Image (tube, grey):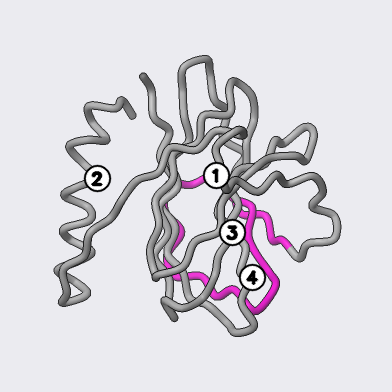
Amino acid sequence: MTRKTLALVLPALLLVVALMAGTTMAIQVIKIKPDTPGVTIIKEVTTLKLKTLPPTHRIDPITLPPNTGVLIGPFTLNSGQELGIYVIWSPSSATLLIGILNAQTSTGYGAYATGGSAAYVFNPGPGSWYAVVFNESPYTVSATIYIFIISQ
């Protein structure tokens, strides 16, 4: 998906989601690199409770119990491509870690989000990458996840 296509599709998608929810919402897409302030570096995933899902561009509502998450992918990125992750969840007070993880090294980075929706664009470089959504909250979360491969 090119940036131009994403720029055309994402606002329409967000409008549909907002209309379905019966409310209006504003979303800010945050571009993330490993050196971005506030980014959490993921050094090890063996201690996390993660379920691996096949690479798809939309995960319909998934239940994430406390301290569990999903790996979606892997997605193969070429030079100049980025991975976009948009998540909508409830309850909105829950804290999620949204990030990416290298399929070969099991290292990556991400950011914490609250508020019920978040959109991040990651620029990790070429390779195989998983999208990561992890529920840091002490209660169960229901989330819908959208994944975009963005070409420059």
* Real-space CA distance between mark 4 and mark 2, rounded to the nearest whole angstrom: 27 Å
Q: Earlier in the sequence, mark 4 or mark 2?
A: 2
Residue at 65% x, 64% y is 69
**At 22% across and 75% down in the image, what residue appears?**
21
Element on which disc 4 rests: loop
Q: Where on the picture, by quarter, is residue 31?
A: top left
Residue 119 drawn above or below residue 80: below
Q: Position of residue 141 (x, y in %)?
A: 52, 77
- The circle drawn on residue 101 is none
Circle 1 residue: 55
Q: Look at discs 4 and 2 and give the one toward the viewer.
A: 4
| Residue 10, disc | 2
Please state the extent of the stretch shown in magenta in the rendering: 50-72
Q: Which residue is mark 4?
A: 136
The residue singled out by tag 3 in the image is 97
Q: Separation of disc 3 and disc 2 at Cα?
A: 22 Å
Residue type for callout 1:
Pro
In the orientation shown, which residue stands out farthest toward the front? 37
In the rendered structure, does residue 69 fall within the stretch colored magenta? Answer: yes
Question: In this orientation, which residue lies closer to the viewer: 118 or 128?
Answer: 118
Q: Are marks 3 and 4 in contact (CB under 8 Å)?
A: yes
Question: Closer to us: mark 3 or mark 2?
Answer: 3
- In the image, 35 versus 97, the foreground residue is 35
**Mark 2: few/some/many CA within 10 Å (<14, 14-19, 20+):** few
Residue flagged by tag 3: what amino acid is it?
Leu
Q: CA distance from mark 1 to mark 4?
A: 23 Å
Label 4 packing within 10 angstroms: few (<14), some (14-19), many (20+): many
Closer to the chain start, of discs 3 and 1, is: 1
Residue 3, image x, y percentages: 29, 27
Which secondary structure, mark 3?
Answer: strand
Q: Position of residue 82 (x, y in %)?
A: 46, 29
